[in-house]
């Protein structure tokens, strides 16, 4: 326990679960999510996706891409995602490093004529200022995450209509 008057700069852990529902076949949704290099064309706030290291395994396992985000609160986040597991048409799992560390898992499930997309994002912050502000700003960081994910859902919904 920190002494009174000291600042806690330990990483703050966040666990988010986002669920999207689309009136589209799972193959179509999968193809769009799998083509991560094109995400900035439909996901506002995502400023770039850069290949850092190509994968050597099947389905590109080991591939590392750098994602740069400009958030609704105005700060920028840069996260490298390493592809660690793929189950075609069902699951994409990545390990995050950079401004956030942890895991991200996309799960796709067909339901009638719809596709349910779930994203589980379990990360901790590495930026000192975020750790310092977390005790009071955590609700804002949560809201910011929700806004980023809403922009993704909205953008993908429009993209699917094309």
Image (tube, helix red, strand yellow):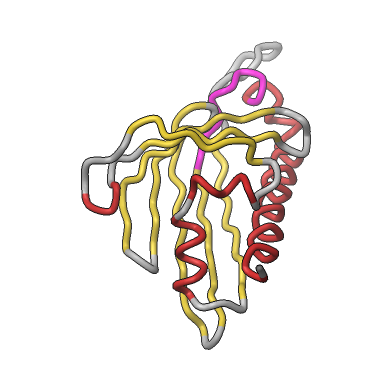
**Residue 128 forms part of the magenta stretch:** yes
Q: Please tell me whether residue 120 is drawn above or below residue 54 in the rendered image.
A: below
Q: Which residues are magenta?
A: 123-130
Q: Residue 140: x percent and y percent? A: 76, 39
Q: Please tell me whether residue 143 is drawn above or below residue 5 in the rendered image.
A: below
Q: Residue 38: x percent and y percent? A: 54, 48
Residue situated in front as seen by the camera: 40 or 113: 40
Q: Please tell me whether residue 45 is drawn above or below residue 150 in the rendered image.
A: above
Furthest residue in direction left, as rendered: 57
Q: Residue at x 47, y 53 (%)?
A: 35
The reply, left or right, for residue 21 in relation to residue 32 is right
Residue situated in front as seen by the camera: 135 or 25: 25
Q: Quadrant of residue 161?
A: bottom right
Q: Quadrant of residue 2?
A: top right
Q: Residue at x 54, y 27 (%)?
A: 99
**Residue 86 forms part of the magenta stretch:** no
How many numbered marks appear?
0
On-image quarter of the N terminus: top right
Q: Residue at x 62, y 24 (%)?
A: 131
The reply, left or right, for residue 86 in relation to residue 46 is left
Q: Residue 10: x percent and y percent? A: 54, 23
On-image quarter of the C terminus: bottom right
Q: Residue at x 46, y 33 (%)?
A: 80
Furthest residue in direction front, as rendered: 162
Residue situated in front as seen by the camera: 117 or 10: 117
């Amino acid at each position: 326990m920190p002494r009174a008057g000291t600042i806690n700069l330990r990483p703050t852990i966040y666990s988010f679960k986002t669920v999207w529902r689309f009136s589209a076949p799972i193959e179509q949704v999968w193809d769009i999510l799998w083509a991560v290099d094109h995400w900035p064309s439909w996901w506002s706030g995502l400023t770039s996706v850069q290949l850092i290291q190509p994968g050597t395994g099947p389905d590109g396992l080991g591939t590392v891409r750098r994602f740069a985000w400009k958030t609704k609160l105005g700060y920028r986040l840069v996260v490298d995602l390493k592809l660690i597991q793929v189950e075609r048409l069902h699951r994409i799992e990545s390990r995050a490093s950079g401004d956030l560390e942890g895991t991200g898992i996309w799960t796709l499930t067909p339901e009638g004529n719809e596709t349910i997309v779930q994203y589980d994002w379990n990360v901790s912050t590495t930026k000192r200022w975020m750790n310092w502000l977390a005790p009071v700003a955590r609700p804002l960081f949560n809201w910011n995450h929700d806004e980023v994910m809403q922009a993704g859902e909205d953008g993908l919904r429009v993209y699917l209509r094309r």
